[in-house]
Amino acid sequence: MSALKFRLPPNDGPVLSVVDMHTGGEPVRIVLSGAPVPSGSTLLEKRRWVRENMDWVRRALLLEPRGHRDMYGALLVPSEEPQAQLGALFMHNAGYSTMCGHAVIALGRFALDYGLVDPQSPETPVTIHCPCGLVPAYVSYSAGRSGRVRFHSVPAFTLCTDVTVDVPGYGQVIVDIAYGGAFYAFVSAERFGLDVCSSRTRDLVDAAAAVSEAVKAQVKIGHPDSEDLAFLYGTILTDGKDAYSEEPTANICVFADSQVDRSPTGSGVTARIALQYHKGLIHLEQTRTFRSGATDALFTGKAVKETVCGDHKAVIVEVSGQAHYTGAASFTLESDDPLKDGFLLK
């Protein structure tokens, strides 16, 4: 039997072309073409405009039947910052994030491999404009091939520590809240009788999601730069091993609408390093390894410089990881398809 030739059938709707990658098991679907160019003079304005006017792109690409509950996406948009090689809006099952470390790691390779920057050895610098700010990334490049990526975060800081929240079904829970481009609540999984590496994912998700809802209802979160950044993105359950060690420390992040990060979470590692530095548990240039409780994937992180963010003492954090390509696709939306806009099963 001769090989069948693939072609898209006649279609009366948009066609969205994407490249799929993953970083430590966490997917990122990068939109190449087919999406409108968002309006707005700044990236945050574009983020608001996309949320209000073209959410169909997120729904079509991330939700079923083309995606799944835990799919993640990056929409490439023009940046107003002249030093940025690309701007990106990050999409998940419930909306739009302000930062995504695993996507930055993937986009670093993508920018180099797709000719958005000229290759340099041993590392190619790529500046990515994220909603939280400019994020310099550095892509390993050798023998014509891109590889591991490290990036330097926006100023990361601890918002508050030892905050008690009433969590329905779990009682009073003490959490820390830190910012790494997005805000996370941190609590040891042991508080719930769980282990981030061996407990059922469903049990971890239920506990983390309950904490997130309690924090959102009971703790006021603010950011000195913009109200667009002032929201809790998720909860990270840890193995409780916060003091510096050469051994990996594990965590699992649950964000958005109970979405589970398969990677160690780049912005979560950033926030966790900021929290450890704030508590005096880690020093500048001490590299820690972070393990995903979901996939055993590893990121490294270290605080490289002190800085400030408004009135907060902050640090710049370097995070390093590896992304891989998984494929490319063109997705169609037929006008007579009643499920063309996507759906999620609860």
Image (spheres, rainbow, N blue to C red):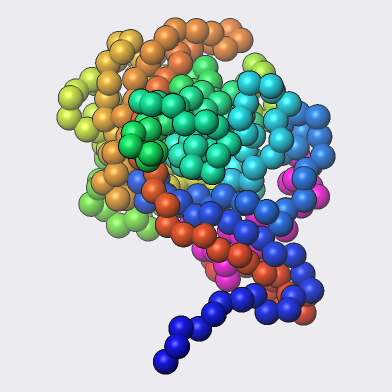
Magenta region includes residue 25:
no
Rendered view: 134 above or below 210: above
The residue closer to the viewer here, 239 or 285, is 285
Residue 24 appears anywhere in the view = yes
Residue depicted at 49% across the width and 55% down the height: 20
Residue 178, position in %: x, y? 47, 25
Pinpoint residue 248: horizontal percent, then vertical percent.
22, 33
**Towards the viewer: 319 or 142:** 142
Q: Position of residue 201 (x, y in %)?
A: 34, 55
Query: Which residue is at a point 46% across and 59% down the rendered structure image?
Result: 327
Residue located at (55% from left, 63% from top):
329
Q: Look at the magenta stretch and give its main secondary structure.
A: helix
Q: Is residue 65 found inside the magenta-colored segment of the image?
A: yes
Q: Is residue 280 left or right of residue 108?
A: left
Tell me which residue sits at (78%, 43%) in the image: 38
Most foreground residue, 215 or 113: 113
Q: Which region shows up in magenta?
A: 48-70
Residue 332: quarter of image? bottom right
Residue 220 showing in the rendered view: no
Q: Quadrant of the N terminus?
A: bottom left
Would you place residue 243 above or below residue 45 in this image?
above
